[in-house]
Image (cartoon, rainbow, N blue to C red):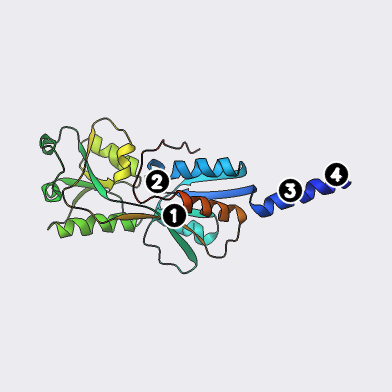
Amino acid sequence: MLAEGARLAERTRRAAAGDTGHLTLGFISAVDYSVLPGILIAYRKAFPGVTLDLRELTTDVQLDMLRDGRIDAGMLLQPVDDVTLVTLPIISERLVAVLPARDPLLRRRGPLSLHALATRPFIVAPRANGPGLHDTIFDFCAHAGFVPLVAQEAIQLQTIVSLVSAGLGIALVPASLKDLRRSGVVYRSLREPSPLLTVMLVWRRDNHSACLANFVAIARAKRARKPRAATRVAVS
């Protein structure tokens, strides 16, 4: 009985410290190619007893699931206008153009002018699923003097790149997507500096989970302002 009591006390202590438990994290696909792998590696090394449930979700779905308590935290694009949620900037990056490999514009070397894309069909994510990215692209194009001609919409950034490789149009994507190697496409930087896209780590203000607090601390230490190469994380 004494031994069992000691084991129970130790389990309680570890749970209270966040050494054991469960953490559910939502994330947009862009962070899968930038900061997410490094954060996960550091967290798993520090807290191997915590079970991680990773879910690749769009920004709108993450916000709904955060409010309902179905995920503990999310990595999504700003803006987040909800006083019940806490936000921590994780990474800021600019847009790059992705074009079919045989596009005539690629004959020119160096960065592309955004205005040169004005007559090209665009592939974009629906605004309902990611207003931050959608509005950033449309505002950026408006400053260049045109409205994007939307030929196709796709929810996931990987799908957008795939549609570009099929020759259905061009796209503007976060710069970290350059780490997504896809045949039939070429990524090019833009001559005009685009607005910054900021990914936020977001969680409920009333979530006092020790596992969450530890994850936030590691994300704060690992966050970056520039994207870096990373290995894609397998999500089951």
Element under disc 3: helix
- Whichever of labels 3 and 2 marks the residue nearer the N terminus, that label is 3
Query: CB of mark 1 within 8 Å of CB of mark 2?
Result: no
Query: CB of mark 1 within 8 Å of CB of mark 4?
Result: no
Residue, disc 1 = 61
Query: CB of mark 3 within 8 Å of CB of mark 2?
Result: no
Say which residue appears at 51% left-offset and 44% top-offset. 54
- Which circle marks residue 3 in the picture? 4
Task: Give the distance between the C-alpha atoms of the residues marked 1 and 4, in whole angstroms.
Answer: 46 Å
Dividing the picture into quadrants, the one containing residue 188 is top left
- Whichever of labels 2 and 4 marks the residue nearer the N terminus, that label is 4
Say which residue appears at 17% left-offset and 46% top-offset. 121
Q: Mark 3 belongs to which amino acid?
A: Arg
Element under disc 1: helix
- Whichever of labels 1 and 2 marks the residue nearer the N terminus, that label is 2
- One can see residue 127 in this view: no
Q: Is residue 208 left or right of residue 57?
A: right
Say which residue appears at 16% left-offset and 59% top-offset. 143
